[in-house]
Image (tube, helix red, strand yellow):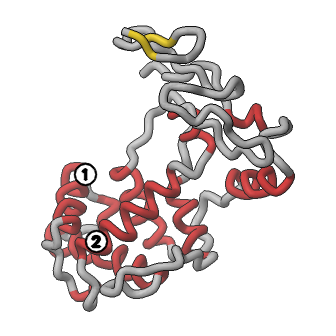
Amino acid sequence: MTDRYPGYNVMDKRDTPSWNELTRKVIDERLATPNTPTYLSDQEWQTLNAICNRIVPQTSHRPAVPVAALVQQKLADDNRDGHRQGSLPPLREAWRRGLATLDAAARTRHNTRFCELDTTAQDQLLHAMQDGELTDLELGDMPAETFFKERLAHDILAAYYSHPTSWNEIGFGGPASPRGYVRMYFNRRDPWEAVEDTSGHTAEVTRDNKHVR
């Protein structure tokens, strides 16, 4: 796979006017998140890792984003969103039930744990949860499909795209405090933003950053 933004590393901005001390502190803490079971049990940690690997499978040509570790840190900090779907319990309880449900469903259908299933079987169970077809007792009164949408997919994707490695992948300039962004129009970029490699693409970028055919 070819990088869309070859040579780009958002961490090159760390000591530039783009980032202030608070931004550096937050990103440094994010990069230092322990990739081990610190809050979750070993079984919950293994289940969460298996789920993350199916929701955001990663390639081997760039460093992996520790998605499960970032989700675990959210749970450890009890970092809630400030709002909650009424049919879901609080953050930690929702995840505890969700992880237990997928393990229980794996045992019922395949006589093994979720993390030990092949990827096809894992995907089938995740689709069943997404479609509201899992009714295992571990769910309690929590709707499976609501947990999948509002917690599982939401938290995993948010964790993935909170990491500098994923910013490099999509050419995101990362935080810009205190400098900020200036060219906010479509197909425009500030000088310190990533330049996309358009070779093989239909569109090309001219010197003033406007796409032309």
> Is 69 on the left or on the right of 107, as rendered?
right
Residue 62 versus residue 73 in the image, above or below: above
Q: Position of residue 126 (x, y in %)?
A: 24, 61
Give the camera-side residue of 41 and 86: 86
Q: Give coordinates of residue 97: x percent, y percent.
A: 36, 82
Q: Is residue 132 above or below residue 171?
A: below
Q: Is residue 72 above or below residue 58?
A: below
Q: Position of residue 116 (x, y in %)?
A: 31, 59
Q: Which mark is residue 148?
A: none
Q: State the separation of the CA atoms marked 1 and 2.
A: 14 Å
- Under circle 2, the secondary element is helix
Give x and y (percent) for residue 44: 44, 72
Q: Residue at x 50, y 71 (%)?
A: 42
Residue 62, quarter of picture: top right
Tell me the mark number nearer the camera, choosing from 1 and 2. 2
| The N terminus, quarter of image | top left
The label number, if any, that marks residue 118 in the structure image? 1
Check disc 1 and give the amino acid type.
Answer: Asp
Instruction: Say which amino acid is labelled 2.
Output: Leu
For label 1, the SS is: loop
- Does 50 appear above or below 181? below
User: Which of the two labelled residues, at mark 1 and mark 2, occupies the earlier sequence position?
Assistant: 2
Image mark count: 2
Q: Quadrant of residue 58?
A: top left
Q: Is residue 35 left or right of residue 211?
A: right
Residue shown at the point (34%, 12%) measured from the top left = 202
Quadrant in which the C terminus is drawn = top left
Q: Which mark is residue 102?
A: 2
The answer to whether 25 appears left or right of 1 in the picture is right
Residue at 55% across / 74% down in the picture? 75
Observer-nearest of 46 and 69: 69
Is 212 on the left-hand or right-hand side of 125?
A: right
